[in-house]
Amino acid sequence: MTTPAHFLTLTDLPPGKLRSLLKRAVELKTMQQQGEHYEPLKGKVMGMVFEKSSTRTRVSFETGMAQFGGHAIFLSPRDTQLGRGEPIEDSARVLSRMVDVIMIRTFEHEKIERFAACSRVPVINALTDRYHPCQLLADMQTYLEHRGDIRGRTVTWIGDGNNMCHSYIKAARLLDFKLHIACPEGYEPESAILESGTGEHVTLIRDPLEAATGSDLVVTDVWASMGQEEEQARRVKAFANYQVTEAVMAAAKPDALFMHCLPAHRGEEVAASVIDGPQSVVWDEAENRLHSQKALLELLLAN
């Protein structure tokens, strides 16, 4: 039996294939908006394993499978033996004999790696504590639509060195752009991941205004991710100077874009005037979860 192709991090796709996928996502979006019926996954079934809840992830994957002529099964911790302590490896062996692709949204990245190692079908990382590659596909598709190829551009990440920040580090190397990371001390990305991108691609800069200077894209995320709610008060204090404000956007290029993976807390990580302002493309970014993931599903299953 051949080993299936998985999508656990962005680096599972070589740069050329990643760029082709982004262009295909734009094509699929145009086809869908023009009412063209395209069902390459007719008869295919996706298992969606959710240990972390999500609006955009569930709706985008389920809609994508429906538009492609396939079907999706939603599985919460209450719906699977995973939630009752069945070994991850056993669940992978069983589920992958019944469905054609498995999407997992969970906590520990090691858990999805163990699952993929025992799966007969492609496994997609729909978010772990370490990476969020599907969101990066949507972000990069959005930039491509609005400004063209991101190669050689400058992106500024402001906030926590979290799974989104880790995925931006991967994207900077793959797509050849410069990434400025502005985060308070103690909230840096994992050192091994940061070091893999430092040099010509990634620079850690403490001052958000300095980091945003001359940037083509400014990105942020919530200060406390799911599972970190008990740290909220401490994080609000630590990140007080790391809000994306109009002043931060003014330091960037005049045509710079603003992105946020959502949900957003206006008045915390981003000012309402920024996320609801003319430079914000967050709604296109959210919609593009659907189209970029359809391109991913087509790549993994239809070719």
Image (spheres, grey):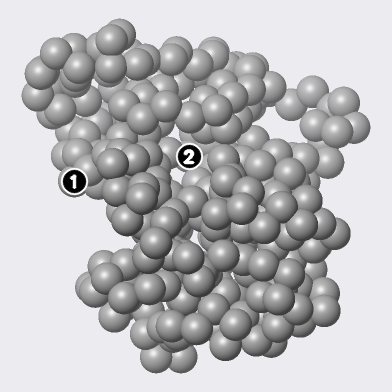
Label 2: which secondary element: helix
For label 1, the SS is: helix
Q: Residue furthest bottom?
A: 200
User: Who's the residue at 42% across and 27% down the image?
Assistant: 53
The answer to whether residue 42 shows anywhere in this view is: yes
- Residue 34 in the figure: left or right of residue 169: right
* Label 1 vs label 2, nearer the camera: 1
Horizontal arrangement in the rendering, residue 255 relative to residue 215 (left or right): right
Q: Which residue is under mark 1?
A: 110
Residue that mark 2 sits on: 300
- In the figure, 169 relative to 54: above or below? below
Of residue 153 and residue 283, the one placed in the foreground of this image is: 283
Q: Residue at the location (66% across, 75% down)? A: 248
Quadrant of res 114: top left
Instruction: Judge whether 210 appears above or below 91 on screen.
Output: below
Quadrant containing the N terminus is top left
Amino acid type, residue under disc 2 in the picture = Leu
Numbered tag placed on residue 174 in the rendering: none
Q: Residue at x 87, y 26 (%)?
A: 35
Quadrant in the picture for residue 60: top right
The foreground one among 183 and 32 is: 183
Q: Residue 302 at x, y = what percent?
A: 55, 34
Residue 39's spot in the image, x, y percent?
68, 23
Label 1 neighbour load within 10 Å: few <14, some 14-19, many 20+: few
